[in-house]
Image (cartoon, rainbow, N blue to C red):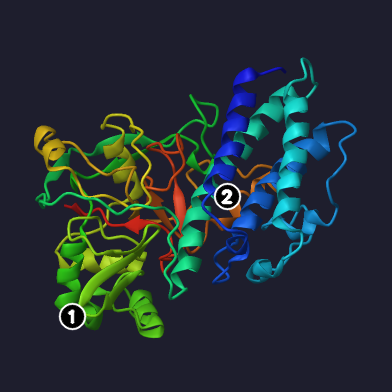
Amino acid sequence: MNDVSIIDAYRRAREQSKGACEPLVVEDYGLQAEAFTSPPKWHLAHTSWFFETFILKPFFEGYQVFNPVFEVLFNSYYNAVGEQFPRAERGLISRPTVSEVMLYREHVDAAMTALLGQKEHLDADVIVDRCRLGIEHEKQHQELFFTDLKYSFSRNYLYPTYAEGFVSSATKSVGMGWVDFPGGLVEIGVDEKGVGFSFDNESPAHKTYLRPFCLADRLVTNAEYQAFVDDGGYQKPEYWLADGWASIQKNQWTQPLYWLELDGQALEYTLYGLQSRHPHQPVCHVSAYEADAYANWVGARLPTEAEWECAALQMPAAAQTARSFHPQALDTMASAADQGQLFQLYDSCWQWTASAYRPYPGFEVTEGAMGEYNGKFMCNQWVLRGGSCVTSEHHVRPSYRNFFYPDDRWQFTGIRLAKK
């Protein structure tokens, strides 16, 4: 094997996870405010469990597991592997300690480095493929680390700060433009063995017919969404899907998650702490129901995932931007110079689409436990496209299919409008 590139990619991903923990104090590692979140310590252990379970145990002769009980404690949802510790109780796992989890990571890293460094192995291709999947899986958990931590921090009236600094942003608004696309017979998705990495749910490539459509060139802003709130949008059932109306009544939602009004000030909780709500930044942390209701209110709609991918494929490749822990307003100079460009595709908020998360035509579930990665979740969820300000490096592409339940709000989710 001795694949230097895969070893380097593995090491970088593992170091990035540890690096994200540097601002934490030991008390932060066990935070779990709700069942849909997981503690930072659990993310660190589960990603190690993934490499141990699906690569080291089956392919590294003589490998000694770090602790057999970890197979249950840090199994997320793989029924074919065995029992799982209840998700809602992950915050109760005070032992192993943070130090022991870090030792677990070192144990797994040493074994993975040794295995990947072997010059010959009968299952070399399978090992490399699974390692690539494990690296992308770790990047998914790096993003979940931030979204989960933000939610847990937000429940503390001290409003803890993860990162120092302030949320800088543009001082001028940028009008919303529209980019036309002719539609027709287009191809979306990727071949599983195509160029670069892709998850199985992005395959196979297939053709679909689109009517002519247009997409907004940027995301909906806080000020624009505030107008919906001020107009009584949360009190007018005509804008809402039935399930969405039921959700806002049940949860008593009146505005996006993390919006606050204190002492007459419009504020927003961020990973930089409590900040003044900036009118030109993208509205963030809205459910699919809220995104759909806003689109109805403004006389537009949400794009389908096929429209989003078709449009994104015609844009320049995603560029890496400086790390920010909050979505930033669109730069007026950039927008003026690039007519016909779609902005904020990957670096601000995941964008809700109107598409149900279902398999593509010809999709086949992988045999065994690995088939549980995506396939079994293709029910009752909506597709999101793009990426967010906390998405890991090199983890975005036009074909990426993210998915969440339509009432989920703790992810960095925003709104891009469509028409026609």
Q: Looking at the picture, tell me which residue is in the foreground, 370 or 30.
A: 30
Residue 363 visible, this orientation: no
The type of residue carrying mark 2 is Asn
* Secondary structure of residue under mark 2: loop
As drawn, is 193 to the left or to the right of 325? right
Direction right: furthest residue: 62
Q: Quick one: 207 or 122, which is closer to the camera?
A: 122
Question: Which residue is identified by label 2?
Answer: 374
Residue 167 sits in which quadrant? bottom left
For marks 1 and 2, give the one nearer the viewer: 1
Occupied quadrant, residue 95: bottom right
Amino acid type at image mark 1: Gly
Q: Position of residue 345 (x, y in %)?
A: 30, 43
Q: Tell me if 264 is positioned left or right of 61 in this view.
A: left
- The residue that label 1 is drawn on is 232
Instruction: Give coordinates of residue 346: x percent, y percent.
Output: 34, 42
Residue at 71 percent of width and 17 percent of height: 2
Label 1 with label 2: CB-CB less than 8 Å: no
| Image quadrant in which the N terminus is located | top right
Q: Residue at x 76, y 42 (%)?
A: 52
Looking at the image, which is closer to me, 188 or 348?
A: 348
